[in-house]
Structure formats: structure tokens, C-alpha cells
Amino acid sequence: MADADPPPPREPALRIRRVPETPIAAVIAVLSTIIGLILLAWTILFVTKGRFLKHPFERIVSHSTGRVVKVPGDFQLYFDPIDVKFVAEGMTISNPAWAKKPYFFQARRIDTRIASIPLIFGRKRVNWLDLLHGDVNLEWDARHKRNTWTFGDPDAPGKPLEMPVIRRAIMSGTTLHYTDPMMQLTTDIQFETIKAADTQFAGAIRFAGDGHLRDRRFTLSGALQSPNETLAGGRNQFTMHAVSGGNILDVSGALPGATVIEGADLAMKVRGPNLARLFDFLGVAVPDTRAYHFRSHLTKEGGAWKFTRLAGAFGDSDLAGGMTITMPDNRLKIDADLASRSVDIVDIGPFIGYEPQALASKGVVAAVAQKGDHPRILPDAPLRVDAISRFDAHVDYKVTDIKAPHLPISNVALTLDLDHSLLKLSPLTMDLSRGHVASDIVLDARQRPAFTDYDIRLSPTPMGTLLAGFGVDESGTSGVVKARIKMSGRGDTVHDSLASANGRIVVILPKGSFWTRNIQLSELDIGTFLTKLIGHKLKKPVQINCGLIGFTVRDGVAAADPILIDTDKNVITGRGGFSFKDESLDFSVRADGKTFSLFSAQSPVGLDGYFAKPGLRIISPQLLTRAGIGIGLGVVATPVAALIAFVDPGDAKAAACGPVLAGADASAQRTTKGKPRKDVGNGKPLKR
């Protein structure tokens, strides 16, 4: 049997290898899936208008905002084609429980398009808004800590209001309510879109409203006109007119967007009877003024409102410069750099408490509320402690010239700092008759009543120039005067502060001459006073060796400490003083001759009355006593003997000028022989 042939060898089976996918292919596949899902979602949303999302929308938004959000009517939320299209009928957003109104927002219908791409990067831009019978309630709580537009935690501190950029809007029957109990401000503003007949503007959003600020009613109206090119980055023309208590404000210019103030280019004009009433809108205390008018450029940069190229006038005084208003740590701050070419002294009066209209028309006495049976001139207008506690400030102010009869004041420079009710006027400087005044005044209203510290210094100043308006002859007066007032007191008015003051007032007269022309100072004649005092007709100047007029002030009462003036022929001394409490004067000034004089009354001449109405007391008790003695001698002896009572033996002791020029008190004064003086005021008022 033949062997069988072996079977043919099997060929190996073919193996199919999978070529691995490339990374690019994987990415394309994933992207295709995502795009497909997006297109599918977009198609579903576009076809259904996203109406099926109403309840999820209400639930999610309510949870994230901490408010109840409801949309009882039609609801649409979809992409058209890229921007988010949102429509809601009857939508309401509740207010927190503490608010007075139940809803933060409600509208019959809201139809809007929101830019999607900017939203991804956190920028809110509304390309289109159609709002029908909307109602928005913006409200602060009583402590100004929470507000209705800060969502989430109801106890979280309120954030500043940030409006989305709205490029185009139509509003019908929409109202905005704003309430701030701390500022005592409430307002209601109605918005309405008016279709324009021309081709320049597609329409204008008109607004009008009213409100109350600190019990003062105001009205406002205006318009926001949107140019056709707004969507391409154009600007919106804005106008506003507001009136309150005679104050009229007009603002016009361009806004970058309908709700964008940042970078605005605005012109402002304001006028009225009293600048203080205008600043009440900010809760800022400024003194009352006469009628004013100002214009300014206005813009907003970051958190700062900037008023530049400010110019105008108040009363008969001009004012120019710039001002910036900010809110660091949610507290109002004013920074200003201001200047005046000329200021009327009447317009300065209100800064220390005088009523400007009465001051201008009737004088100082009329500007102060009179009490009792004597005239008063110290202002008693109360410091507005509550108002200055609400803001801080830094102000630099310069005045070239002050129009004031008898007071040649110029080149005033003031730096004002207000920090949480601590007010500093430091430095406050001015030129006064070729002399210089430097002051530092600190008012601490953190204490009640307010505590004020005064430090006012007058550098050596020519007396002739300083007192020329009061009858002093410049050509015959070569003397100078320097002075310092260092006092502190408590009170919420200038009068009360000075009426409780303690400190010292010093006027020093170095060597020089003094001559008057016998011209009246109010109702007190300086020439007559000096003539009666030293017994000369002042046909030539009085030569002064040195002089000191010093007062020690205790609880508002100033007593001579000392009054001592050494001239070539007399030594003038004084006692008494004055009171800031009732503004009374009670001086007794005496001149003792250094040489023999046969006919000399040698008796004190008095100053009495009040600051507002000083009097000259020529017939003093001492003079009557001397006259009585003279008459007695004439009766018992001879008529010639009667003259003995009027003889001045000329035994006045010259003053040592060292303590005088140092401004030392009475206890330190000496004669030229070094002996203590007992003939000068000792810091105690007269006893009558």
C-alpha cells in the first residue's frame, strides 16, 4: 500500500491590525460632539424659545439671590443667534424683609438682549431693553448698612450700585424709587421713551420726578437721547434740570452709554439764593451765603466725581478752582483747591456765624440775634455738628484781596482739614498792613460741646498802616505792633466758645511814635480819648518807648494783665477788662506824667459800654473827688490853693522795657530801677 501524500501546509491566518487614532482626530471627534450638542441645544431652545426653563429659572435665581423670583406670564430664554434673548411677563423680584416695599423689581413685560461673549468675561452689557410698566425700588436701611440691590445674604453690607451697560432702550410707564433714611432723601422718577420725528435720534428717554431731601422738596426732569450710532460705540446726549428752594441745577453733555457715567463729558450750571442749601443734597455743611452762580466741567473717573474749571461767584466774591468728591470706605470725602481774586468781608461773615443778608444790609449788630437790653456782635449761629460728622474734607483756599473798610487784608491762604468731626484750620495766614497773621485753629466736635483751640499770631506790623482808617496818621506814626491770642473754650457757637474761654491776649508796642488825626472809631473818638488821657492836643506824635496791652482770660472774662505803655512824657497804665459773656467793656486807663504839670486832671479815663457800642467815661469818680478837694481848698484858703488838687508832680516811674517787650504778666513788670510795679492791672477785673 502506497503511503498517502502528506497534507499541504496551512497558510497562516491574516491578522487585521487597527491603525490607532491620531490626537487630532480625537480632538475633532470631541469637538464635533460638543458642537453637535450645542447646535442641538441651540435648536431646541430656539424652537421652544426656552419656555420649558421657566420653573428651573425661578428656582435657581431665587436660590442664588436670596429673593423670591416669579414669572407668572410668558417666559423666553434662548440664544438669538448669539446674544441671550430674555422675555418675562409679570416678573417680580421680592425685597428683603426690612424694606418698606414688597418688591425690588416688577414689570408687566421685560424684553431684552444680553451680549453673551462679554458676559463670559464678567462684563454685563445689554444691547436692547424694552421695559413696559417697570417698577424698581432702591432703598437703604435706617443705618445705611444694607440695601435692596445687594443680593444673597440679607445681612451682608450693601454694595455700591453697578448698572449694566445698556446700549439701547425703550421704556414705557417705568418708575424708579430711591430711599435713603440717613440722608433723609426720597425720590420717585418716571421714565418714558418719546419717539423723535427727526432722523438724528431714534428716540429719547424722558424722565421727570420729585422728592424730598431733609424736608425740602425738589423736582427734576431731563432726557437721554440715543444716537443711531450708539450700537457702534457712539455717545448719548444727556440733559437734566433740577429745582429746589430757589436752587436751580442744569447738566448737559454726553454719556458713553445710556447707563454709563464713567468718562462722561458734562457741563454743569447752578445758581440760587444760598449755596448751603445746595450742599445739603450731599449732606455737607457749608456756611450760608448770599446769592451764588457757578459753572463747571463734570466727569466721573473710577470712584471720583470731578468738578474742574469751576468758576462763579457768591455775593460780591468770586471763586474758581476744582473739587473732587469720593466715597472711601463708604464715607463722603471732599477735596478742593479753590481761589478767589476778590472777596467781600460780608461774604466771610457766615463762616464764623453771621447771617449774610443782615450783615450786608444792616451791619454786624443786625446779623446777630439780640438778647437782653444791650447790643451784641459775637455770632451765635450753632455749629452744625450733625452735618460735619457725615463727611471728611481737605480744602486749600487762597484769596488775593479782601474788600473790608479799615482792614487792609490780602493774600489769605487757608488749609482746612476735616476728619471725623475734627476740624483744623491750619495754617490760616494773611497779610495785614505790611504785617503777617498766622493762625492755627482746631475745633474738636467729637467732644460735646465742641472744644476750640485758638492760636493767632500777628508779626510786627506798622501801626500807621494798620490803623489809618481809624484816624491814625501814617506820616506821624512810626511804631509797630505785634500780638498773639492763645485761648481755648467750649461751645457750639463762636459766642459760647469765647464766653467759656481761658488763655491770654497780648499786644506789644516796641519803640516808635504814634499820632492821631482825631477821627472817630465807631462812637469812640481815639483822638479825644488820648487828649483827655494825657492832656495834650497831639499837635505832634507821642513817642512810645515800649508798650504792652495784655489780658488774662478766665472763663470768658478778660482782665488787664497788664496795660502798661511808657512814652517820653507819660506812663500809661490800665485796669479792668471786658467780658465775652455779655460783651461788656470796663476799663480804667490813667496817664501819669514824668515831668511837672500844673493843670492835669491826673485821673483815670474810662472805656465802658459794649463791643457793639463802646463809651468814653471822662468824668470819673477820681476826677470828681479831686475837684471836690480843690473846691474845699479854695473855700478854706485861697482860689490859688484850689489848683493844688490838679497839680501832677511828675513822679511817674518809667517802665523797664524788657518784661514789656517779652509780653510778661503784671507780676513780672518792673520800673527802670528794678522795683516791682504796683500800678498796673493784675489780671483781675474792676470791682465797682
Image (cartoon, grey):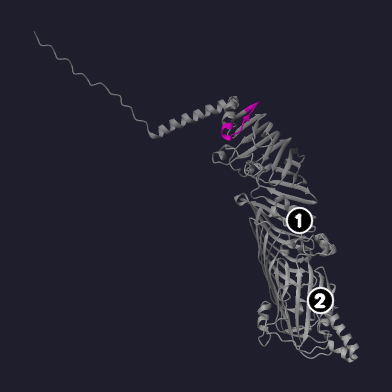
The disc at residue 606 is: 2
Q: Badge 2: few (under 14), some or many (20 or more) residues near its Cα, within 10 Å?
A: many
Q: Badge 1: few (under 14), some or many (20 or more) residues near its Cα, within 10 Å?
A: many
Q: CA distance from mark 2 to mark 1?
A: 44 Å
Query: Quick check: can you spot residue 517?
Result: no
SS for callout 1? helix
Residue type of the residue flagged with mark 2: Gly
The disc at residue 191 is: none
Mark 2 or mark 1, earlier in chain: 1
Q: Position of residue 175 (x, y in %)?
A: 72, 37
The extreme left residue here reads 1
Residue 461 figure quarter: bottom right
**Magenta segment includes 127:** no
Residue at x 14% of width, y 13% of height: 5
Query: Quick check: can you spot residue 40?
Result: yes
* For residue 457, above or below residue 142: below
Instruction: Give the position of the N terminus as an image quadrant.
Output: top left
**Magenta segment includes 73:** yes
Residue type of the residue flagged with mark 1: Leu
* Pick the front one: 116 or 658: 658
The disc at residue 275 is: 1
Residue 173 figure quarter: top right
SS for callout 2? strand
* Pick the front one: 671 or 289: 671
Q: Position of residue 92 (x, y in %)?
A: 65, 31
- What range is drawn magenta here? 61-75
* For residue 350, above or below residue 386: below
* Pick the front one: 245 or 600: 600
